Image: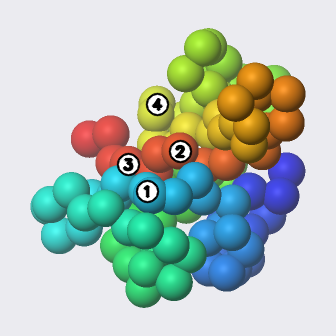
Amino acid sequence: MAFQQAVAAHDTKAVAAMVAYPFTANVGGRKVKLHDAAAFRRHYDVIVTPDIAKVITRQRYADLFVNEDGVMFGQGEAWLNGVCKDAECKDFDVRVIAIQPTR
């Protein structure tokens, strides 16, 4: 999976390109709205901590949890979902919608 590969390679540019913006992240204990990939990349190491990266890269496809909110990695450390590109949602992109500590 491209997301796991990008996280494993610490490819901040690739991960940032997979995120749905605006993106709300926990930065320094505060919720911060990031409006674009450049902002995400500046905060990458605070958002994708070593513990979260480990959860993402070790997630097995067969063990992913899926519901109407999307696809969950680990215990909710990361979520991906389809983001509609048109009003009817006939065209969509799969994007990262959340990366968060769960403990």
Kind of residue at disc 3: Gln
45 is higher (above) or lower (below) than 80: below
Q: Amino acid at mark 1?
A: Phe
Instruction: Report whether 76 appears left or right of 96.
Output: left
Q: Is residue 101 above or below residue 69?
A: below
Locate residue 66, reporting x and y percent: 66, 18
Per the image, the residue denoted by label 1 is 23
Mark 4: amino acid: Gln
* Quadrant of res 57: bottom right
Residue at 62 percent across and 79 percent down: it is 12
- Residue 98 percent location from the top left of the image: 47, 45
Nearer mark to the viewer, of 1 and 4: 1
Residue 82 vs 44, above or below: the answer is above
Residue 30, image x and y in percent?
15, 60
Q: Is residue 70 visible?
A: yes
Q: First in sequence, mark 1 or 2: give its number.
A: 1
Tell which circle, 3 or 4, labels the residue nearer the N-terminal end. Answer: 4
In primary-sequence order, the first of circles 4 and 2 is 4
| Residue, disc 4 | 75
Q: Calculate the distance from the C-alpha at mark 4 to the C-alpha at mark 2.
A: 15 Å
Amino acid type at circle 2 is Ile
Q: Nearer the viewer, residue 12 or 94?
A: 94
Q: Are marks 3 and 4 in contact (CB under 8 Å)?
A: no
The 10 Å Cα crowd at callout 1, few under 14, some 14 to 19, many 20 or more, is: some
User: Which residue position holds label 2?
Assistant: 97
Q: CA separation, marks 1 and 2? A: 7 Å
Which tag, 1 or 4, sits closer to the chain's start? Answer: 1
Q: Classify mark 3: residues with Cα within 10 Å, few (<14), some (14-19) or many (20+).
A: some
